[in-house]
Image (spheres, rainbow, N blue to C red):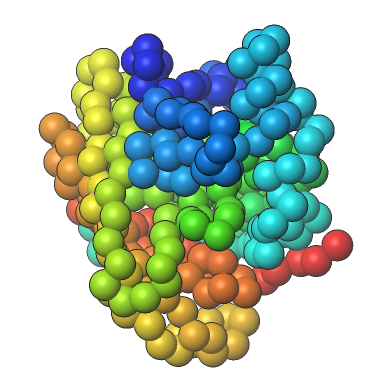
């Protein structure tokens, strides 16, 4: 739970028929929204979000907001409603490349040479119309060999002229990504640009698979644009900005290296988890409406 005055929480209910239970996930953006009506942007502990009438004004006046408003999508150039960004991924644990299969016991990991029909092969961001508390609304879709899994996870991202910021996939043991630096790039898009951010994380994201803790921790992030140049991807070779980030908290340090292209967004994400394992994501396909 977010501390009072530090931000807001969205409780998202998720259902997976094989789990036969409801999972409650708290999505938090940490920071107070200091708002002056003359300003278009509000800073949320470092993330610049646009002031939206359908969210800020309506919620202040009535306690509600308009989930159908497209205000926060009006200036998007990458993450537009109807597009789907599909990633291949790999979880490297003790040097073994693995996929996630939440139908198996133990760690929930299977090595890439022994995938099953229920193994999650790819994960995507499907951009949806409307908004989620003033953020661009999207669904993470988890693909098995037989198509989309029935697990439902929805969240929000921010794209505007000042920054692009995404929640990472966080279903079941994808939870480990909550402790890593989130995909995030900030203007000016030049090598040497630096910025910070912080996020409060509840203990429902803890696990004996990577790290256990009680109550809440605060991750403090340091980001920098550390390079620019061509990167070979499954979508071709494209010029990308390289973003390097560290996150520090009382449970340890995590890291991320990300590559961002102004046309395709984040095309590669390399996370170093708190236990030294790695979570790697590569954009392989973009579907357009």
Task: Identify the image quadrant of the N terminus.
Answer: top left
Q: Residue at x 42, y 60 (%)?
A: 186
Q: Name the one closer to the observer, 185 or 43.
A: 43
Residue 96 position, x and y percent, is 31, 62
Front one among 274 and 149: 274
Residue 231 in view, yes or no: yes
In the foreground, 233 or 78 = 78
Measuring from the top left, give residue 23's x and y in whole percent.
56, 21
The answer to whether residue 52 is above or below residue 80 is above
Q: Is residue 58 above or below residue 107?
A: above
Residue at image location 68% in from the left, 64% down from the top: 77
Residue sitting at the far right: 289
Q: Nearer the viewer, residue 82 or 95?
A: 82
Judge left or right: residue 174 versus residue 220.
Answer: right
Position of the C terminus by quadrant: bottom right
Say how many tags the image has: 0
Note whether 83 is above or below 261 in the view shown: above
Q: Which residue is at a point 23% across and 34% down the rendered structure image? A: 211
Does residue 248 appear left or right of residue 81 in this picture? Answer: left
Q: Can residue 284 be spotted in the picture? A: no
- Give the image quarter of residue 288: bottom right
**In the picture, residue 212 is in which quadrant?**
top left
Q: Is residue 3 left or right of residue 38?
A: left
Residue closest to the far front: 38
The residue at 32%/28% (across/down) is: 200
Give the image location of residue 56, x and y in percent.
62, 26
Task: Give how far across and how far down residue 14 sits, in percent.
Answer: 63, 25
- Say if 94 sits above or below 232 in the image: above
Relative horizontal placement of residue 57, taking residue 26 as reference (left or right): right
């Amino acid at each position: 739970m977010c501390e009072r005055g530090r931000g807001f929480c969205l409780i998202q209910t998720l259902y997976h028929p094989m789990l036969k239970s409801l999972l409650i996930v708290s999505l938090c953006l940490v920071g107070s929204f200091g708002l002056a009506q003359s300003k278009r942007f509000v800073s949320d502990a470092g993330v610049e979000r646009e002031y939206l009438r359908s969210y800020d004004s309506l919620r202040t006046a009535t306690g509600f907001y308009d989930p159908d408003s497209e205000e926060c999508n009006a200036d998007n150039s990458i993450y537009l409603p109807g597009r789907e960004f599909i990633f291949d991924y790999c979880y490297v644990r003790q040097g073994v490349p693995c996929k996630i299969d939440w139908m198996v016991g133990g760690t929930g990991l299977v090595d890439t040479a022994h995938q099953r029909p229920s193994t999650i092969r790819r994960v995507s961001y499907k951009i949806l119309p409307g908004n989620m508390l003033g953020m661009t609304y999207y669904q993470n879709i988890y693909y098995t060999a037989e198509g989309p899994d029935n697990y439902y996870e929805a969240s929000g991202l921010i794209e505007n002229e000042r920054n692009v910021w995404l929640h990472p996939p966080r279903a079941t043991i994808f939870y480990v990504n909550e402790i890593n630096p989130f995909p995030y790039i900030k203007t000016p898009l030049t090598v040497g640009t630096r910025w910070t951010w912080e996020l409060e994380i509840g203990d429902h994201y803890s696990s004996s698979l990577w790290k256990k803790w009680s109550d809440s921790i605060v991750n403090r992030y340091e980001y920098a644009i550390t390079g620019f140049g061509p990167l070979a991807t499954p979508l071709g070779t494209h010029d990308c900005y390289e973003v390097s980030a560290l996150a520090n908290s009382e449970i340890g340090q995590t890291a991320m290296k990300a590559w961002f292209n102004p046309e395709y967004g984040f095309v590669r994400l390399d996370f170093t988890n708190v236990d030294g394992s790695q979570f790697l994501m590569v954009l392989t396909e973009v579907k357009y409406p």
